[in-house]
RNA sequence: GGCUCAGUAGCUCAGCGGUAGAGCAGGGGACUCAUAAGCCCUUGGUCGCGUGUUCAAAUCACGCCUGAGCCA
């Protein structure tokens, strides 16, 4: 029997600008959860990609004086680069300009068309090109500017458009939300969607007559398919094996429906309302969950180009390394809530948790092992009721539950608590005194228990800080080249450190970050 | 304007009916294996404001203030 699957997606990112920290944040969460599920032995599909159609892309490319496809190629490559830098292990990278994606979109369209859910109508209103959305007049700022893009004036449009009959799915959607409260998470986002749907769903436009950069409208060459309609279908395209024909039948074969669509809270509506309705129309299975995470601020302020306080993910990662960036964002911000980045807190947390509590624990213990013995993992019998062993046994299911609930912050906190307990244990046992008293048996047992605890921490923390975990395990003497070779069973069980194994020389695994003096 | 979420120690947050908590930062101490790390102790809060319900409210209700968000 094949392993059970786990499918998690990030949104596909719009190639209008260089990747920003928000995209990185979503992708880091997805990666950590995917890594956890792989550790559990699941057949995981983690997908991300880029959204490359629409008027905004067309215009940006024109402004840059390059053909749109070249523009997309260049910007899409930036995302790939950032994911490499951040140690993101995705399984597939979808680009909406890929002909294979277009084939899936056409087949999907055909099914919706056959249901009679697409009709022609007239769309009038103010349109924000940056949002690629129509806006209500009441929503616009003084002078007709978009509230989300205060420097962009909304444009008046009066067009013949094709519409998707969303209103037809009002009832089915309400039933879905009622029967599956977990479909939209967290709770606050769910409430928003519920109140939105309650007001009554209107049909939405799925074509644009004046945009050429996109997938041609299958039944009317004068029109182009609306970018959102095209973009959402990427999740199905991603489910197709790259070696297989791009058909819906092949999409359904193994990796559909998705377990989690992880999205920013700004696009929950598209994923929790439009997308399931589209799937209902096409008679395809629905994803199991849409999770809307929060936004990031910097020093308590909203980030934005106009404020000039953006946080460049490339710069941050190059300066501090992927593990530091991942650890901060995954553990210091509760997924689902907004979170803040402050460099001073960033440095404090990394030093306290990774350099001091964990890094120094390994270092001090290996140093003792070196000084007091032959620098091999001691061959000792650990009593069943050893306090560190008992604690690890208690923590293991709690850590698992935290990852399952998309809460890497809690997972890390529980995991680190064994490192903290180990530091305390060392101080209480004082092996340095025991050594002077010649009690080498006891010293061996203490050092083994602590080193094994560090190994356990490295394994359970590996979805969040894969490189750091690998370094720890290598220093403990494991011949491991790829952290994804680990498996929960048995690696997450306390007591796996092989006796007589020879560790590498003790070297700090996480350099303490020096705080710039506030002068 | 309607709705949602939040407002608790310097910072980030937990608690959500029964004498105010954690981590980080700050202060002190003993120790020495260690990346001056870790360990122990500690300073610090009329729990946004007001009214009410209750023997008892950070915790429930109502109103207000502030911030974030949703209203195609």
Image: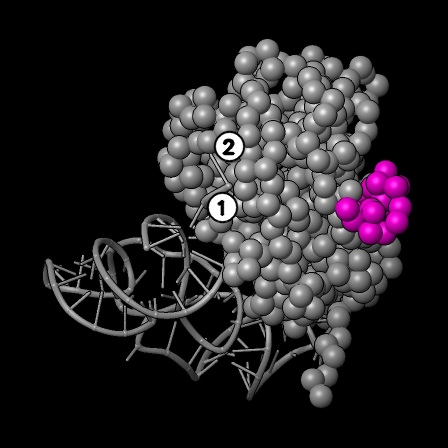
Residue A93 drawn above or below residue A341:
above
What residue occupies the far front of the structure in this picture? A158
Q: Residue at x 86, y 38 (%)?
A: A69
Name which quarter of the figure residue A3 lies in: top right
Residue B1 drawn above or below residue A367:
above
Q: Is residue A112 left or right of residue A72?
A: left
Give the overall secondary structure of the magenta segment: helix
User: The magenta stretch spans which residues?
Assistant: A59-83
Q: Chain of mark 2?
A: A
Residue A518 picture location, percent across and down: 69, 84
Query: Helix, strand or loop at disc 1?
Result: loop
Q: Residue at x 45, y 21 (%)?
A: A168
Q: Is residue A86 visible?
A: no
Q: Is residue A112 visible?
A: yes
- Decide which of tag 1 and tag 2 comes sooner along the chain: 1
| Rendered image: mark on residue A273 | 2
């Amino acid at each position: 029997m094949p392993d059970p699957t786990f499918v998690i997606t990030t949104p596909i990112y719009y190639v209008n600008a260089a990747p920003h920290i928000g995209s990185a944040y979503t992708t880091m969460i997805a990666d950590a959860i995917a890594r956890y599920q792989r550790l559990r032995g699941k057949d995981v599909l983690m997908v991300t990609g880029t959204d490359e159609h629409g008027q905004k892309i067309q215009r940006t490319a024109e402004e840059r004086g390059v053909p749109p496809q070249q523009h997309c190629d260049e910007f899409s490559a930036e995302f790939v680069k950032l994911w490499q830098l951040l140690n993101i292990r995705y399984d597939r990278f979808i680009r909406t300009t890929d002909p294979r994606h277009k084939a899936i979109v056409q087949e999907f369209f055909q099914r919706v068309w056959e249901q009679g859910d697409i009709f022609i109508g007239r769309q009038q209103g103010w349109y924000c090109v940056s949002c690629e959305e129509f806006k209500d007049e009441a929503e616009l700022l003084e002078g007709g500017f978009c509230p989300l893009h205060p420097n962009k004036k909304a444009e008046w449009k009066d067009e013949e458009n094709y519409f998707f009959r969303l209103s037809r799915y009002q009832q089915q959607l309400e039933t879905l939300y009622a029967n599956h409260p977990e479909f939209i998470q967290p709770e606050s986002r769910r409430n928003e969607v519920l109140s939105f749907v309650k007001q009554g769903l209107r049909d939405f436009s799925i074509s644009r007559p004046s945009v050429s950069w996109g997938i041609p409208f299958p039944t009317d060459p004068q029109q182009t398919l609306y970018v959102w309609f095209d973009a959402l279908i990427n999740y199905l395209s991603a489910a197709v094996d790259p070696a297989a024909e791009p058909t819906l039948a092949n999409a359904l074969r193994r990796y559909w429906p998705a377990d989690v669509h992880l999205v920013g809270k700004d696009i929950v509506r598209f994923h929790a309302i439009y997308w399931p309705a589209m799937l209902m129309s096409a008679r395809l299975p629905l994803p199991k969950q849409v999770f809307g995470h929060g936004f990031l601020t910097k020093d308590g302020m909203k980030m934005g180009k106009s404020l000039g306080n953006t946080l460049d993910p490339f710069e941050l990662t190059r300066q501090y390394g992927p593990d530091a960036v991942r650890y901060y964002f995954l553990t210091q911000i509760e997924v689902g809530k907004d979170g803040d980045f402050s460099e001073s807190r960033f440095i404090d947390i990394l030093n306290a948790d990774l350099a001091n509590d964990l890094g120094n624990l390994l270092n001090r213990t290996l140093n003792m092992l070196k000084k007091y013995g032959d620098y091999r993992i001691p061959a000792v019998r650990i009593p069943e009721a050893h306090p560190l062993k008992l604690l690890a046994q208690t923590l293991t299911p709690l850590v698992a539950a935290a990852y399952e609930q998309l809460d890497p912050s809690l997972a890390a906190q529980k995991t680190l608590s064994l490192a903290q307990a180990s530091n305390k244990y060392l101080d209480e046992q004082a092996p340095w005194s025991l050594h002077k008293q010649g009690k080498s048996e006891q010293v061996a047992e203490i050092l083994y228990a602590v080193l094994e605890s560090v190994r356990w921490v490295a394994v359970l923390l590996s979805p969040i800080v894969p490189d750091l975990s690998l370094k720890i395990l290598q220093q403990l003497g494991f011949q491991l080249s790829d952290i994804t070779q680990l498996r929960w069973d048995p690696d997450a069980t306390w007591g796996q450190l092989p006796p007589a194994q020879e560790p590498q020389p003790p070297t700090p695994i996480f350099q303490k970050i020096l705080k710039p003096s506030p002068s």
